[in-house]
Each structure stands twice: as structure tokens, then as C-alpha cells.
């Protein structure tokens, strides 16, 4: 499960990425700073069960801080997108190709209106950021339609004359983009195109492509640089009914993360406040900057960066966290580690789904599962809940 960081050039994508991953992404004030995609790891927060079970956890694939499990998520910061990218303008083809494996998109928008549609700096408030939301959605839709249109006549004819499932054929055509057949089937239902596929127009296919993106690669809007945004412009952007829009200040998050890493402050990503460890160790400029950031946090309740990631993962993808263990009594794996691993899986997943998530052999040879809380034995179709601790029993 990959999270794609997208947007036009010069809106703060790389700053957003660096703040989320503490990666050394190149950050500059000109278009196409990012050419090769930056890949890093961000973390979503989940409740660690160790306090409830009164044990000390020994995490393996994640981290635990004061009862909060930090669950890793792969992040991809791709090259900036400009209008007509789907036709190859700018770095369009590369940008779109880098998005193939992303499950969800965080679209970083310059909420201050200080960046032109092509990604060049302009006066704050002179560009409407709502146009950026519309154009990027359109670019992805045109890109998807261009892929569907290749061999479309053949696909449509086979579906209409031979009764082949159009969703399966489209999934094969879009297979390299990590869309599932069920997602395409859902998009088809939502669009409700009339007649046989060979009668659908290019406009019909554009509507379908747009819906496939919404279902298969949902998008959240990070209204970045909102500390600079005119209030009316920010209110207009955040009132978007078609997207979740979260005010963000990536520069502030990056500054806080770096200050915390250096020991100047105590701060946890996503928090609405921080504490200064050594006031005397700060310069006047640092004190002033931290004062400005503190006022911002009090107004917005946080920088919004962590909130964007967790909203994307927990709300748009609708994932839950589950802890598999080999011994339901000691909560350990075969090496004796306590609550070592946590996995993010779709809400509604069952015990066999978890088994496959851990290892293909466990799924193939699944016998039963045991709920570590209740010690109840459950079958393969048992639906899992967030923060479940489960033992999977499999044959050889």
C-alpha cells in the first residue's frame, strides 16, 4: 500500500514529503525540483495493545512510543504535474507512470494562491487554488482514458458480442495501475453507462475513467501554505464538497520535526502544541519562529501533515490495524517477541485475509484462528476489528 504525494510544481510537495518522512528530499523554489520520485516511510498512529494486556511489547515491523504504535507506510513524492501532462507536457508521462502503484493520493495545493497553474511563483492571492484541484483530477482522468482507449474497440466488441465481463477486461487493461476488478465494477455501477460497451462514447469513457480514479486511487487535498493564505481563499478551498480538504503548513511541520530531533523541543507529529527544552539555547530568531508556529498550532490544531496521512489511510482506504501472534497466551512470535508486528488491512477483512497478509502459506493452509482477548476459536470468515490480536493456526 503506497501513498502518492502529487501536485503541480512549487507547491511544497517535497517539503510535505520531507516533513512526513524526515527524508533529505531536495527542496527549492523552482519547477521540477523533483525529477526522480522520492521514496520514504511515513507513519500512521495506532493504539498498541501492550498496555491493555499489561505486557511490554517488543516491536519488529513498527515502533511504539508511549502506547502509540507507529505503523510504517510507503510514501512516494513524484514529479510535479502541469496542464496537458497526459499528452506528455512537462514531465507528465513520468509523473503519471510513477503513480502506478499508489493506492491513495495526497494532492498538495498552494492554498495561498501564490503559484501559477504552471508552477511558477506569483503574488499571493493571484491564483485560485481550486483550479489546481480540478486540473489535476482532469489530467489523471484523461491519462486513464488514454490507456482504456488502446484496443478499446476490440475490448468493447468482445464484451458486447461474447458476453465477457467488461470490468475484468478493463482490469486487465489497467492491471499495471494496481486497480482491482471489484473497484472497476463499482465505478461502472456508479457511472451507470447505458447500452453496450461498443456504443459508449469517448465522453462516456472519460466519466468512467474519472470514477475509476475516485474509487481506485482516492484523493485528499492538503491545503498547504495556509498560514499565508487569504482567509476568503482558504475558506473557499476547504468548502469543496467533492474532496476532503485539510489545511496544512508543511514548513512548520518540518521545522518542528527538526527541532525535536535536535533536542530543542519536545514534539510529536500531529500534536497541537510543543514544549521548549532549553529556552536559553535558542536564538532570538528561533524563539520568534517557534512563537509564530505556536500561534498557528493554537488556531488550526496542528500542522495538518500527519492528519492528511492518517485521513488518507484510515478514512479513504478504510484500513484497520491487526496484530498477529503465534502464542495467544504470551502474545509472542516464534522468537519470543511480544506483539512484534502490526498490519494494516481493509475494514471487513476476515481471519484468512490476515493469514494471507502474513504469508501465502498461512492463507493456503489456514485451519482456524484464535482471538487473544477472548481465547475464542474462530473460522476463516471471522471479521476482524481494529486492534485485534489474533493467532493463526495452519496445517503443513
Image: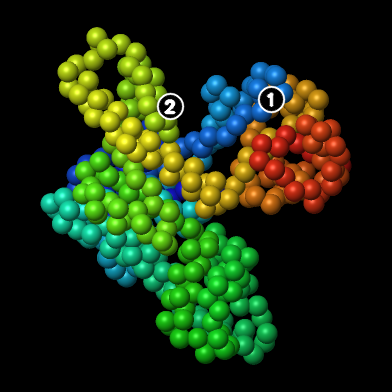
Residue displayed at 70% across by 43% down: 385
Q: Nearer the viewer, residue 2 or 34?
A: 2
How many residues crowd around disc 1 within 10 Å: few (fewer than 14), some, or many (20 or more)? few
Give the structural element (helix, strand or loop) at label 2. Answer: loop
* Tag nearer the camera, 1 or 2: 1
Report x, y in % for residue 139: 35, 66
How many residues crowd around disc 2 within 10 Å: few (fewer than 14), some, or many (20 or more)? some
* Disc with the residue nearer the chain's start (1 vs 2): 1
Q: Quadrant of residue 8?
A: bottom left
Q: Nearer the viewer, residue 260 or 9?
A: 260
Report x, y in % for residue 360: 73, 47
Mark 1 — residue?
Answer: 52
Mark 2 — residue?
Answer: 268
Note whether 79 is above or below 49 in the view shown: below
Note whether 336 is above or below 239 in the view shown: above
Q: Whole-Å distance between the Cαs marked 1 and 2?
A: 22 Å
On the question of residue 23 being in view, the answer is no
Residue displayed at 36% across by 68% down: 138
Give the structural element (helix, strand or loop) at label 1. Answer: helix
Quadrant in which the C terminus appears: top right
Report x, y in % for residue 290: 26, 25
On the question of residue 137 being in view, the answer is yes
Residue displayed at 63% across by 35% down: 342
Q: CB under 8 Å between callouts 1 and 2?
A: no
Amino acid at each position: 500500500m503506497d501513498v502518492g504525494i502529487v501536485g503541480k510544481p512549487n507547491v511544497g510537495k517535497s517539503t510535505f514529503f520531507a516533513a512526513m518522512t524526515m527524508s533529505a528530499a531536495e527542496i527549492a523554489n523552482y519547477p521540477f525540483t523533483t525529477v526522480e520520485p522520492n521514496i520514504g516511510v511515513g507513519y500512521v498512529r495506532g493504539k498498541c495493545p501492550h498496555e491493555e494486556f499489561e505486557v511490554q511489547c517488543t516491536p519488529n515491523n513498527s515502533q511504539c512510543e508511549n502506547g502509540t504504535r507507529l505503523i510504517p507506510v510507503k510514501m512516494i513524492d513524484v514529479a510535479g504535474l502541469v496542464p496537458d501532462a497526459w499528452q506528455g507536457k512537462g514531465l507528465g508521462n513520468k509523473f503519471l507512470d510513477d503513480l502506478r502503484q499508489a493506492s491513495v493520493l495526497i494532492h498538495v495545493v498552494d492554498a495561498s494562491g501564490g503559484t501559477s497553474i504552471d508552477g511558477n511563483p506569483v503574488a499571493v492571492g493571484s491564483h485560485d487554488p481550486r483550479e489546481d484541484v480540478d486540473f489535476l483530477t482532469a489530467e489523471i482522468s484523461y491519462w486513464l482514458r488514454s490507456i482504456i482507449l488502446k484496443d478499446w474497440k476490440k475490448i468493447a466488441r468482445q464484451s458486447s458480442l461474447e458476453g465477457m465481463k467488461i470490468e475484468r477486461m478493463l482490469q486487465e487493461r489497467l492491471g499495471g495501475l494496481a486497480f482491482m476488478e471489484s473497484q472497476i465494477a463499482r465505478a461502472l455501477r456508479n457511472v451507470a453507462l447505458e447500452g453496450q460497451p461498443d456504443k459508449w462514447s469517448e465522453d462516456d469513457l472519460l466519466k468512467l475513467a474519472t470514477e475509476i480514479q475516485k474509487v481506485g486511487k482516492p484523493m485528499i487535498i492538503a491545503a498547504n501554505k495556509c498560514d499565508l493564505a487569504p482567509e476568503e481563499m482558504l475558506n473557499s478551498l476547504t468548502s469543496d464538497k467533492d474532496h476532503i480538504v485539510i489545511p496544512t503548513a508543511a514548513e512548520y511541520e518540518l521545522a518542528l520535526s527538526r527541532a525535536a530531533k535536535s533536542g530543542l523541543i519536545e514534539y510529536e507529529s500531529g500534536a497541537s502544541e510543543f514544549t521548549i527544552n532549553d529556552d536559553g539555547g535558542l536564538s532570538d530568531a528561533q524563539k520568534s519562529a517557534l512563537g509564530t508556529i505556536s500561534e498557528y498550532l493554537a488556531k488550526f490544531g496542528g500542522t495538518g501533515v500527519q492528519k492528511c496521512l492518517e485521513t488518507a489511510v484510515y478514512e479513504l482506504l478504510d484500513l484497520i490495524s491487526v496484530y498477529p501472534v503465534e502464542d495467544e497466551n504470551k502474545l509472542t512470535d516464534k522468537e519470543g517477541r511480544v506483539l512484534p508486528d502490526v498490519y494494516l488491512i481493509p475494514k471487513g477483512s476476515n481471519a484468512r485475509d490476515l493469514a494471507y497478509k502474513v504469508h501465502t502459506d498461512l492463507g493456503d493452509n489456514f485451519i482456524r484462528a484464535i482471538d487473544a482477548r477472548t481465547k475464542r476459536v474462530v473460522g476463516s470468515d471471522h471479521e476482524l476489528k481494529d486492534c485485534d490480536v489474533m493467532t493463526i493456526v495452519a496445517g503443513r
